[in-house]
Amino acid sequence: MLQRINTEQAPAAIGPYSQAIQAGGWLYCSGQIPLDPNTMELVGGDDVQAQTRQVLINLQGVLQAAGTTLKNAVKCQVFLKDMGDFAAVNEIYAEFFQGDTPPARACVEVARLPKDVMVEIDCVAFLG
């Protein structure tokens, strides 16, 4: 059985998708971009670290709404506008994923992201 996860702690979907879907013991989170959930305005301007921090705060909000945390993230995908930002994004990413078992991850540079943001991150988390 599938269950839609929706929270005001993350930006509302800006298209025909859910913030996350729970399927059995797994949570599949849509990509988060650096929007303030209250205003739906871009956070961070041209600062990739500020944008990354907001993205991960948004992702935390979705996970929390499903009753879990980033500690249960199994796999993340990071989409960057510029791979030159890799190290700066990693600094912030490491603040949110501490410990001995950070999630598996892919990181790719893309031609363009929604609202021309610099970073987007999605994840799959274990709920059990």
Image: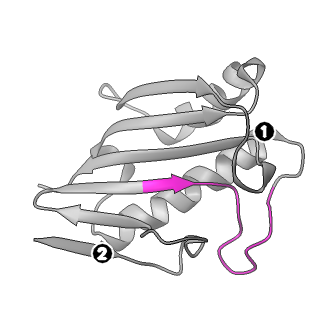
Cα–Cα span, label 2 and label 1: 30 Å
Percent across and percent down for residue 82 are 76, 26
Task: Choose between 4 and 34: the one closer to the eye.
Answer: 4
Whichever of callouts 2 and 1 sits on the residue coming sooner in the sequence is: 2
Q: How is the image coloured?
A: one colour
Read off the residue under disc 2.
4
Quarter of the image with the C terminus in it:
bottom left
- Span shown in magenta: 30-43
Percent across and percent down for residue 107 are 53, 25
- Secondary structure under the numbered disc 1 in the rendered image: helix
Relative to 29, is 98 above or below? above
Residue 109 badge: none
Relative to 105, is 51 above or below? below
Residue at 66% over, 31% down = 110
- Secondary structure under the numbered disc 2 in the rendered image: strand
Percent across and percent down for residue 115 are 77, 56
Image quadrant assignment for residue 88: top right
Read off the residue under disc 1.
48
- Residue 36 magenta: yes
Q: Describe residue 70's horizontal placement relative to residue 55 as left or right.
A: left
Residue type at the position of mark 2:
Arg
Residue type at the position of mark 1:
Val
Percent across and percent down for residue 32 are 56, 55
Residue at 61% over, 45% down = 120
Predominant SS of the magenta segment: loop
